[in-house]
Amino acid sequence: MVPNPCKEVVGVPDPDPQGLLSAVEKRLQALQQQVQDLRTLEQLESMPLVQLQALNHDLDALEARLHQYLVRRTQPSLFWQVVRFVGLGIVIGMAAQAWLQR
């Protein structure tokens, strides 16, 4: 008996030709992506150490700037915190004064 080549390619016993073609195309795309990833790694390995250190320094600086930006965006500024709590203190003080004068 002759082995089924479809089973070896995509792991399916007897798919229809269109399904086999799409499965082979998907596998080809995955393999091409892996080859591209390996080429990128080879390029990184061939870079001088000084250049890699400079890239790492730039990435660290970018990460610090991003963190600072996100922290600044999530926390209200000190000015508005002071305005909020002073205003709240004045309202509570006026309410307490009105309640005590009854």
Image (cartoon, grey):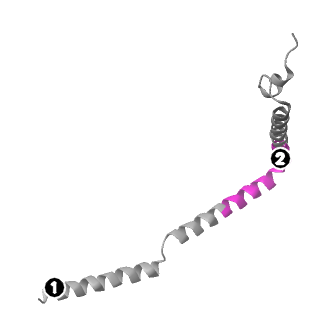
Q: Residue at x 85, y 44 (%)?
A: 39
Residue at numbered disc 2: 40
> What is the magenta segment's predominant secondary structure?
helix
Residue furthest top in the image: 1
Image quarter of residue 56: bottom right
Report the quarter where the C terminus lies.
bottom left
Label 1: few (<14), some or many (≥20) within 10 Å? few
- Place residue 67 in its image quadrant: bottom right
Residue nearest the viewer, comparing 9 with 96: 9
Which residue is at the far right? Answer: 2
Q: Which residue is mark 1?
A: 99
The mark lying in front, picked from 2 and 1, is 1
| Gap in angstroms between the C-alphas marked 2 and 1 | 73 Å
Q: Secondary structure at mark 2?
A: helix
The correct choice, above or below, for 4 with respect to 84 in the image is above
* Badge 1 element: helix
**Toward which corner of the image does residue 35 lie, by quadrant?**
top right
Give residue 18's position: percent from left, percent from top.
84, 35
Left or right, 75 with respect to 65, comes to: left
Q: Give the quadrant of the N terminus.
A: top right
Residue 86 spot, x, y in % from top left: 35, 83
**Residue 23, position as x, y percentages in the image:** 81, 35
Residue sitting at 72 percent across and 61 percent down? 58
Is residue 93 within the magenta segment? no
For residue 88, side relative to residue 69 (left or right)? left
- At label 2, which amino acid type do we have? Thr
Q: Which residues are magenta?
A: 36-62
Nearest to the observer: residue 62 or residue 101: 101
Task: Confirm or deny contact between disc 2 and disc 1 (CB under 8 A).
Answer: no
Pick whichever of labels 2 and 1 is earlier in the sequence. 2
